[in-house]
Amino acid sequence: MGASFIICSMFYSALLLLVYFSKKRLASRENKVYEYIVVTNFMGLVITLFSYLVTLNNKIFPNLTPVINKIYLIYSLTFLMLFTFYTFLISFKKKINLRFNKNEIYKKVKGIFIKVYLIIAFALLVLPIYYESSSINKVFSYGPGSFLCVCMSAVCILLSGSFMIIERENIKKEKFIPLISYIVLLPFALYVQYKYPELMLMTSVETFITFLLYFTIENPDLSTIKELEIAKKNLEETNESKTKFLYNISHEIRTPLTNIIGFTDSLSEKQIDPSIKNDIVNIEASSNNLLQVVNGILDLSKFDNTSLKLVEKNYDLKSMLEELADFSKDIMGRKPIEFRSFFDTSIPNALQGDYVVLRQILLNILANAIERTEVGYIEFSASSIIKDNACRLIISVEDTGGIIKQSKLNNIFAEKGERVDNETLIEGVSTSLSATYKLVKLMNGEIIAQNVYGRGLKITLAVDQEVVNMTKEVPVEESIDITGKKVLIVDDNKLNIKVAERLLEKYNVEITSVLSGKDCINLINSGNRFDMILMDDMMPEMSGVQTFKTLKANPSFNIPTVMLTANAIDGMKEKYLLQDGFDEYIAKPIAKKELDRVIRKIFK
């Protein structure tokens, strides 16, 4: 009967060894101790079976029986001490990891266990052990050595139980099953083996506990998946936080800009003193420059995306270059720097490409030059080489900000390279040359940096764009008459409402305004009819999206609703139109052409 238990246990233990060591394992202390446990248990089964066979054939091997019995007792001690140490690791894992000197604590505890183990093992080798073989199926040992081993078994079980009780809140639930089995089944097996030694139940129970323990060991694949899921969740939360941050920044910056641009735009159309009108034009130009800077900053959500795709549109390069030159002069302030700009007349008026990315590249390079340079000059030049419909732009920025060491110059565009002197931020505009390099590569362009002898740094950019044929006649759209149409403006900012009213004046529409989503819903539900609603999104209590969804819940609601919002970060237009179901989208500050386009579409 006893031999049958041992042989079956050996089969399962060998299978466990094969499965465990055939797969990759996490290099953790817990897994390392388990390796010792599973190997020790298999060796114990071999020793137990061999001891049983030797004892039954005592006449053949009279001197081998005491040696085998001592080896078995040392095995029992080894298994018990390993399992107790494993229980300690599981129970106090969190506390050890939270300690600054966690490695030192682990080594100290490990050292204590090893010292105790060596002392007890030596005692088991020295103390006498007697054995009895009263029948062919009944063999057992007794004496001081056996008694010491039983006492150590009790001590180890008590220690494991104490560790579990003290740190029960820090032990994972799945770990409790094998630990409780160890504490409950092992004393039971000791008692049964004492009463019925022929069963040799002790080692088989240890195999069963080892088998249970296997299912609580962290699987490297599952652990990796779990880590990836956690990383994905953290990334999603980070992206969500970034989107909310950009959403708020977009709203807070664009709201006052909307008012400034809107009022100056309406004033520029009125008959006023020429000198005042000139000031208004300057204010409008500065506001538009600031808006372009804000667009660049708020486009971080686009630039941070590794799957960024270029959005190609027609644009006027000369206007962009002149605007950047004017903006750079404003940024320089009172610095004693001469700003030079030379733009070749051969540059086409209209090109096709991602002007947002190109503008950000040039802005970064110019800002870097302005920050570096204290005296002297900055030269901003552009030329082109045209072949068929392809235009290679060659744009350079040269400064007198001093020579950069060659070791730094070689790494000026490297992401992890040494930072270049004075490569910092200028009034919120990023001057990261490594990010600039990525954007240039995205456009399939080239960028180089070189020292100009005795002066400073020159950065040259080469990028290909497509020439747009502007000879085609653009059909003139007939004016649309919407006189008397009723328009509802929903916005919590009174100045925003005023700006929208000014822009709508020329259309001769009847305007009604409310300051909240609830007021809008009450107005509609009261039977008031409108031909169009201009809806802000970021409002207290109820957002524009929530208001629109509430209105749409009424089957009779069919008023065209336009999202008029300062939330103009990348991807928001698609969200409002496709996901939220708005009929149209206008970003603040409101562009006259965009407002006209939307009105034409809504009223056909």
Image (cartoon, rainbow, N blue to C red):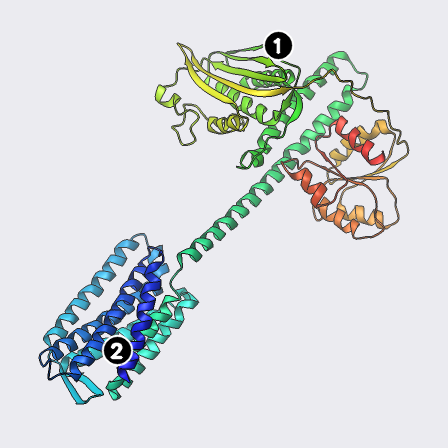
Q: Which is more toward the observer, 197 or 375?
A: 197
Report the residue at 33% width, 72% height from top. 12
Q: Is residue 243 visible?
A: yes
Picture quadrant of residue 455 = top left
Q: Is residue 92 visible?
A: no
Q: Is residue 499 above or below residue 351?
A: below
Q: Is residue 217 above or below residue 276?
A: below
Residue lying at 66% horizontally and 15% vertically, measured from the top left: 349
Q: Residue furthest front?
A: 60
Label 2 sits on a secondary structure element that is helix
Q: Residue at x 79, y 29 (%)?
A: 596
Q: Which mark is residue 346?
A: 1
Q: Determine whether 437 is above or below 554 in the image.
A: above
Placement of 356 over or under 175, stated as above or below: above
**Residue 131: percent from left, percent from top:** 15, 84
CA distance separating discs 1 and 2: 94 Å
Q: Where is residue 406? Give x, y as percent.
A: 36, 19
- In the rendered image, which residue does mark 2 sit on? 154
The amino acid sitting under disc 1 is Ser
The circle on residue 29 is none
